[in-house]
Image (spheres, rainbow, N blue to C red):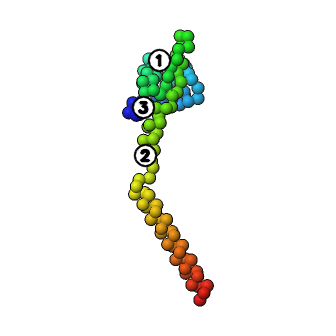
Amino acid sequence: MDEVAGAIADPVRREILLMLRDEPLTAGQIAGRFEISRPAISRHLRVLREAGLVRDEADGRRRVYTLVTAPLDELTDWLGQLTRPSGWQHHFDALETEVYRTRREHLHRDQTRKETA
């Protein structure tokens, strides 16, 4: 998970992943979309490959890169733990439900009293 998080920490690498989401691309096609050098793009692709986020295949003299999303699953699960309500949030939600239920019972009881009076 740490290697994946480190790989996606860079905005250029995140952009590369978004590009590969739509279609496999050659290293040259990827490099052509950035204002940085081809060697810099090659280093970014190496980091993504080592993290398991892309795979490359030889196509003649070209390398074609494809997105691999499986390594993101562990990171996604961990991030989900951060965004889920905490234990306290569940208690507050239960308290809020109880307050609304009690108010509704009081209103119903008051209406019943007025109708019978």
Q: CA distance from mark 1 to mark 3?
A: 22 Å
Q: Position of residue 37 (x, y in %)?
A: 46, 19
Are dots 1 and 3 in contact, CB under 8 Å? no
Residue drawn at x 49%, y 32% as measured from the top left: 70
Q: Amino acid at mark 3?
A: Val
| Quadrant position of the N terminus in the picture | top left
| Quadrant position of the C terminus in the picture | bottom right
The part of the image, by quadrant, that contains residue 47 is top left
Dot in front, 1 or 2: 2
Q: Residues within 10 Å of mark 3 (few under 14, many from 20)?
A: some
The part of the image, by quadrant, that contains residue 77 is top left
Residue drawn at x 53%, y 24% as measured from the top left: 66
Residue drawn at x 53%, y 75% as measured from the top left: 105
Mark 1 vs mark 3: which is more N-terminal? 3
- Residue 81's tag is 2
Whether residue 32 is visible: no
Between 93 and 46, the residue placed more toward the observer is 93
Q: Which residue is mark 3?
A: 4
Q: Amino acid at mark 1?
A: Arg
For numbered disc 1, what is the local secondary structure? helix
Are dots 1 and 2 in contact, CB under 8 Å? no
Q: Residues within 10 Å of mark 2 (few under 14, many from 20)?
A: few
Between 80 and 17, the residue placed more toward the observer is 80
Q: Is residue 38 above or below residue 16?
A: above
Q: Which residue is mark 1?
A: 38
Mark 3 vs mark 2: which is more N-terminal? 3
For numbered disc 2, what is the local secondary structure? helix
Residue drawn at x 58%, y 26% as measured from the top left: 23
For numbered disc 3, what is the local secondary structure? helix
